Image (spheres, helix red, strand yellow):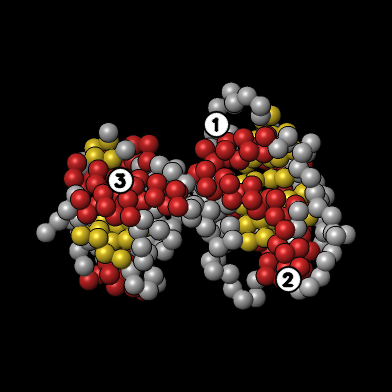
Amino acid sequence: MGPKVLMTAKTLATPGLALLEQAGCAVSFLKEGTEAELAESLRSTPFDAVISRTLALPAIMIETAPALRVISRHGVGYNNVDIESATRRGVPVLIADGANGKSVAELAVGLALSVARKITTQDASIRARQWNRSAYGLQFAGKTAGIVAFGAIGRRVAEILRAMDMRIIAFDPARDRSTTGVDWTETLDELLQESDLVSLHCPLTPETRNMITAPRLARMKPGAILINTARGGLIDEKALAEAVLSGHLAGAGLDTFADEPLPADHPFLSLPQIVMTPHMGGSTDVALDGVAISAARNVLDVLIDGKVDRRLLVNPAVLEHRTVEAK
C-alpha cells in the first residue's frame, strides 16, 4: 500500500491528483469539509501527508497524527497551520510555488475596477428596473496606486495598473528596490497618504496583523479605495466599515476576511461600496491546476525522495531533525 495523502477539501485539480496517484499514493478527500471531519480523519487514519487548503490545522490535530511526514499548503499562505507544532514534530510545512499569483492579481484589479466604477451596484440597479446614469465613477488613469508588499502578486498588480497609466508607489522593507517604474516609500503611512488606490499583498504575521487600523485609514486620501486579496487579518474591519460609511473612503474590494464566512451581522454586508468575493483569488482553471501540481510535488519530494525545496519551506528548523534534506 502506497503513502496515504489527505486533501482537506472535497476535490483536488486533476493534474495534481494524477501526479500523486501515478506515484502510488492513496488520496482521500473530506466529504463535508468541516474541521470536525478533518480532526476525525487524522485521528482514525495514519496519513503520511496532508494537503491543506482552507481548514485550520491546529496543534491538537497535528499532534494526533503520528504518521504525518509533510504538510503541503494548497496556496502560498500558511497562517492556518500551527507551525510550531509541526516543527516540534519534525514535519516540514511547504507552500505552493505561486502558481496562482496571476489569478490573484487579476482579481485584485477586478475588485478595484468594480469599486471605482460601481459595477456591482449599477448591475443591481438595472436588475431592479432602474436606469441611473447619474452615479459617476472614478478614473484610475493619472492617479497613484500604492502596493503594500512587492512580491510576485504585488508586482503583477503594479504591471497591470501601470498599463492603465497609474503612477505606482510601493512599500516593502524586505524587497530589493531596483525595480524600474516604481517609486518606493520609506513608511506604510507615507504610502497611504499618497495613494488613490491601495492594494495589500502581505502575509499574515504578528507584525502585519491589523496593520490597517483606524488611524491609518484616516491617513488615506479622501475618496481612496482599499483592496485586500491577501489575508483578512490585515485590516481592522470595524474601522474600515466606519471609514466607508462616513464617506472618507470611496469603498473597498475584499477577497479575504478575519472570519470566513462572514457572520450574519457583519457591517460589510450593509455597505454596497464594499465589493466582496469569498476568498477565491486563486480559483481559476489555470491557477487551480498549477497550485495542485505544486502541492503534489511538495508531497512527493518528501515522501518519495526525502527532500524539500528550501524556497518553499516555511519552517526550515525541521532540517535539524534530519528527516528531510534541502534540495
Describe residue 180's horizontal placement relative to residue 296 as left or right.
right
Q: Do the residues labelled 3 and 2 touch (CB within 8 Å)?
A: no
Judging depth in this view, the residue of 319 and 166 nearest the camera is 166
Specify the quadrant of the image occupied by residue 12. bottom left
Circle 2 packing at 10 Å, graded few (<14), some (14-19), many (20+), is: few
Q: Which of disc 1 and disc 2 is earlier in sequence?
A: 2
User: Please, what is the three-letter code of the amino acid marked with disc 3?
Assistant: Asn
Disc 3 vs disc 2: which is toward the camera?
A: 2
Q: Measure the C-alpha gap from mark 3 to mark 2.
A: 47 Å
Q: Measure the C-alpha gap from mark 1 to mark 3.
A: 26 Å
From the top left corner, tell me how far across and down residue 69 is, in percent. 24, 52
Q: Residue visible at 40% across and 58% down?
A: 53
Q: In this view, does 311 lie above or below 122?
A: above
User: Please, what is the three-letter code of the amino acid marked with disc 2?
Assistant: Arg
Q: Mark 2 points at which residue?
A: 127
Q: Which mark, residue 175?
A: 1
Circle 1 packing at 10 Å, graded few (<14), some (14-19), many (20+), is: few
Q: Mark 3 points at which residue?
A: 298
Q: Measure the C-alpha gap from mark 2 to mark 1.
A: 46 Å
Q: What element carries label 1?
A: loop
